[in-house]
Image (spheres, rainbow, N blue to C red):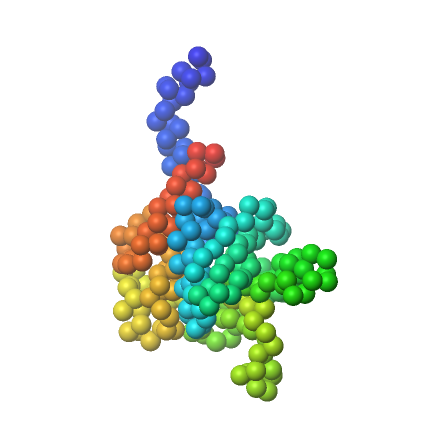
Amino acid sequence: MKTSNFFRNNKNEFKAMNYEFAIINRKTIKTSSSEFMKYLFLNDKNVDVTKNFLSTIMNDVFLPKIKAIQLHTAKPFKTTHNEIFNLSALDEKGQFYNIEIMNENDDDCIKRSMFYWAKRFTATTYDGKNFNGITPTVSITITDKILFADKNKFHWCFLPYDIQNRLVSLDNHQQIHFIELAKFNVEKDDDYISYLSKGNYPVTEDFFAWMLFFKEGWRKDFLKQYTVTNPYITTAKEDYEKFILQHSIKG
């Protein structure tokens, strides 16, 4: 009884504390963090959100869109700073993929991404003998760092090609994406049309929306500041606010 009375009598103070925690969490756990992305994309209720995100990534580099996904219940890989989570996907042409997603900002970001891609890829053989059962593996790394010299291009997709003839690919089993948020230049009140009119790196409207969300979606007034036409981004923003509130209550 004493404990419940204490909480009741100090209700306003606890609300204030949660608000302060929310401010801190909003600045430290942004929408591009591995912790939140796992919360968003591995939610059974967000299958369509996850499909839209993955299809947007694929479509930006002219690869088939994702038709269906299967969420994994296994624990994600843990690196020094972040978690790497994965899921299975089926594209429009009937190809299955093993997809892993991470946020990585260390200096060895590229090597880390390649290492964890290889770890996930080799895990599909189990005994190292049944090579026919190997599933193509896609790695998607979202980073705040600038990795490549090109000042405008911020979405990179690497596949194994012949060095002299890029029309000849080795196979479709290796696909490593890097998305550099630092190069995504957007101003307050920018929409897709105004973004393109400024001569920025050309992307699809859905890709613009996801980049905008990962870059600025942590702001409380995000939906008021920017014009968002993709309904899945609205869902993602709502989930982010729930996520921040849950962490604020936990302290």
Residue ID at (64%, 58%): 124
Residue at x-position 46% and y-position 64%: 91
Position in image of residue 12 (x %, y %):
34, 27
Q: Residue at x 65, y 65 (%)?
A: 132
From the viewer's perspective, tell me whether residue 103 is left or right of residue 204: right
Q: Is residue 162 above or below residue 207?
A: below
Q: How many marks do you count on the picture?
A: 0
Q: Could you tell me if residue 94 is visible in this image? A: yes
Residue 241 vs residue 101, the one in the foreground: 101
- Quadrant of the image containing the N terminus: top left
Q: Nearer the viewer, residue 139 or 94?
A: 94
What percent of the width, then of the height, locates residue 8?
A: 37, 20
The reply to whether residue 108 is visible in this rendering is: no
86 to the left or right of 188: right
Residue 186, percent from left and from top: 35, 64
Q: Is residue 58 above or below residue 50?
A: below
Q: Quadrant of residue 2?
A: top left
Picture layout, residue 100 above or below residue 132: above
Name the residue furthest bottom. Answer: 164
Q: In percent of the image, x 28 and y 55: which residue is there?
A: 225
Give percent across and percent down for residue 61.
45, 72
